[in-house]
Amino acid sequence: MPHIMTIFCAVIAVIALVFFSFQQEEVPKNLLNDKAQHSIETLNPNNTEA
């Protein structure tokens, strides 16, 4: 019986890991505006990406 409980707990843990790995984090609105991108560019002038 203890082996069945161990397997059951392991299956629940794997399901929870898969479920939470696919959850998307909410991005704050202030990180999506142009000012945030501009401040990142001014902090890193060696960045060659456009």
Image: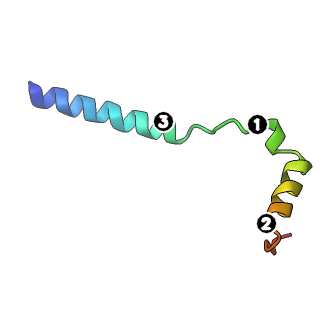
Residue 9 appears at what percent x and percent y?
26, 29
Residue 48 appears at what percent x and percent y?
81, 75
Under mark 3, the amino acid is: Phe
Please, what secondary structure does the residue beneath circle 1 have?
A: loop
Mark 2 and mark 3 in contact (Cβ < 8 Å)? no
In this rendering, which labeled residue sits more in front, label 2 or label 1? 2
What is the CA distance from the residue labelled 3 to the residue labelled 2?
36 Å
Locate residue 31: give its quadrant: top right
| Earlier-in-chain disc, 3 versus 1 | 3
What is the CA distance from the residue labelled 2 to the residue labelled 1?
21 Å
What is the CA distance from the residue labelled 3 to the residue labelled 1?
22 Å
Under mark 1, the amino acid is: Pro
Whether 44 is drawn above or below 34: the answer is below
* In the foreground, 27 or 18: 27
Q: Residue at x 20, y 34 (%)?
A: 7
Mark 1 and mark 3 in contact (Cβ < 8 Å)? no
Tell me if mark 1 has few (under 14), some (14-19) or many (20+) residues whose alpha carbon lies within 10 angstroms of its own: few
Q: Is residue 3 left or right of residue 18?
A: left
Q: Is residue 6 left or right of residue 37?
A: left
Residue 5 appears at what percent x and percent y?
18, 26
Which residue lies under the disc numbered 2? 44
Q: Residue at x 30, y 34 (%)?
A: 11
Residue 20 appears at what percent x and percent y?
50, 36
Q: Residue at x 45, y 40 (%)?
A: 18
Tell me if mark 2 has few (under 14), some (14-19) or many (20+) residues whose alpha carbon lies within 10 angstroms of its own: few
Q: Is residue 4 left or right of residue 33?
A: left
Which residue lies under the disc numbered 1? 28
- Which of the numbered marks, if any, corresponds to residue 3? none
Which residue lies under the disc numbered 3? 19
